Image (spheres, rainbow, N blue to C red):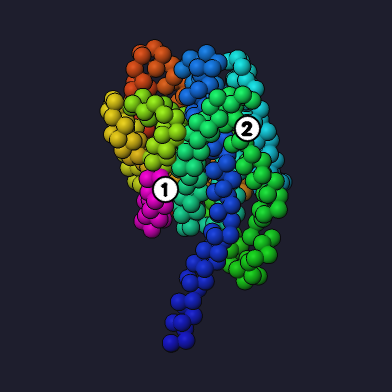
Amino acid sequence: MQHAASIGLSAPVAKTNVYRKITWRIMPFIVLCYLCAYLDRVNVGFAKLQMMTDLGFSDAVYGFGAGVFFIGYFIFEVPSNLALHRLGARVWIARIMITWAIISALTLFVTTPLQFYTARFFLGLAEAGFSPGIMLYLTYWFPARKRGFALGFYYIAIPLAGVVGGPLSGMILQHFDGSTVMKAWQWLFLLEAAPSLIAGIAVLFLMVDRPEQATWLSDAEKAEVGAELLREDDGKVVHATSGAFLRDIRIWKLSAVYFMTIIGLYGISFWLPSIVKNSGIANVEMIGWLSAVPYLVAIPTIILTGISADRTRRRRAHFSAALAVGAIGLALSGYVGQSPMAAVFWLSIGTAGMLSALSLFWGVPCAFLAGTSAAAGIATINCVGNLAGFVSPYMVGGLNVLTGNPAIGLYAVAACMLVGAALIRIIPASLGDR
């Protein structure tokens, strides 16, 4: 009996150890890659502080340019994820990162609104598939019971991009102000593209497509992970035809929820530096440092909510509460007026809630889709949802110009987030809470 008990206790320990090994082996590099991706996607928010004056762009021009990125993203996202599923993550993620780095750097040459729109469109085209591709990649390594933590680990790249990117962008703008070679915002696009290029090349040497190809896992560990993922996939959906996929109402419900969530994400990402500036801060380097604070607060919040959701299996409740808190924080950040401390405080609440909700969301579709359906489903939801990346900055910019009150756009974003927090309740509990 004693011997049997010891055997019974050893299996959970082994499983914990193998997923811990996988986490620390693949996740830090994935986080680094996503940090580079997100930095190049939203550094236009800092370039805006000087670029608009130099080029004579209005808030509406900036908002449209920031958002048109997602039109290119929308067009190529599903084909990109299907290509990753066929060709493997290593080759495809490297291709994505290298091409977007080049296009991001070329943004320094824009001089007209049309050129700005074109650069942003092609940046979205190049980056399409990276985020859903990584989410699909994680389904090859982690079962559902471990995926909440893995996704939380992955999504800390967004606040890390804020913590690193805010001060870095502020210092670049401050240091290169007055450069005789080119404008400071042009240096920003050039210098912040370099890490993506280096990381993209490194992907070819460091990324492993699937557990069975990992030389750093033992044969027993490979078999254990493979068996658990296979058992889990047996209970998931693989659509027989494209028509069956398109008729699955769950895909479209989740797309609607994600759309409202992404409106909140880019309401914060593209406008946070401007909110800090409007609260009474003029120095661009100080704006950079203060813009990092909300993201710093978000990091532990994301991890803790992911762990809690895994343990309680109540993903919908965690998602809904986090998104509602994020909406309240964002709305109040636009209400404080000339008070930098109050603006940063409420932005911290808004950012922590928003990013926690985002990291929790993907546990829902990954819980019921497998194989090609997982590749297409994740890409479709991300594709439709990220159209909000076009709507959000354009909506905020347009409302700013129309009303002359920058708080109105934030209130609109917060309202959309509250709709998303309510919509998650239409997702069946058997999916969201499994």
The amino acid pointed to by label 2 is Leu
The residue lying at 64 percent from left, 60 percent from top is: 211
The image quadrant that residue 79 belongs to is: top right
* Along the viewing direction, whichever of 351 and 14 lies nearer the viewer: 351
- Report the magenta stretch's main SS: helix
The residue at the point 64 percent across, 39 percent down is 194
Q: Looking at the image, is mark 1 or mark 2 nearer the viewer?
A: 2
Write down the region rendered in magenta.
296-314
102 in magenta? no
Secondary structure beneath dot 1 equals: helix
Mark 2: which secondary structure?
Answer: helix
**C-alpha separation, residue under disc 1 versus residue under disc 2:** 27 Å
Front residue of 380 and 345: 345
Q: Earlier in the sequence, mark 1 or mark 2?
A: 2
Residue 147 vertical placement versus 346 (above, below):
below
**Residue receiving disc 2:** 190
Image disc number at residue 209:
none
Residue occupying the point 66% across, 62% down: 214
The N terminus: image quadrant: bottom left
- Residue 404 position, x and y percent, is 36, 14
Residue with the mark numbered 1: 299
Residue 320 is left or right of residue 184, and the answer is: left
Residue 421 lies, with reference to residue 308, above or below; the image says above
Q: Could you say where residue 120 lies in the image, as x and y percent from the top left?
A: 60, 25
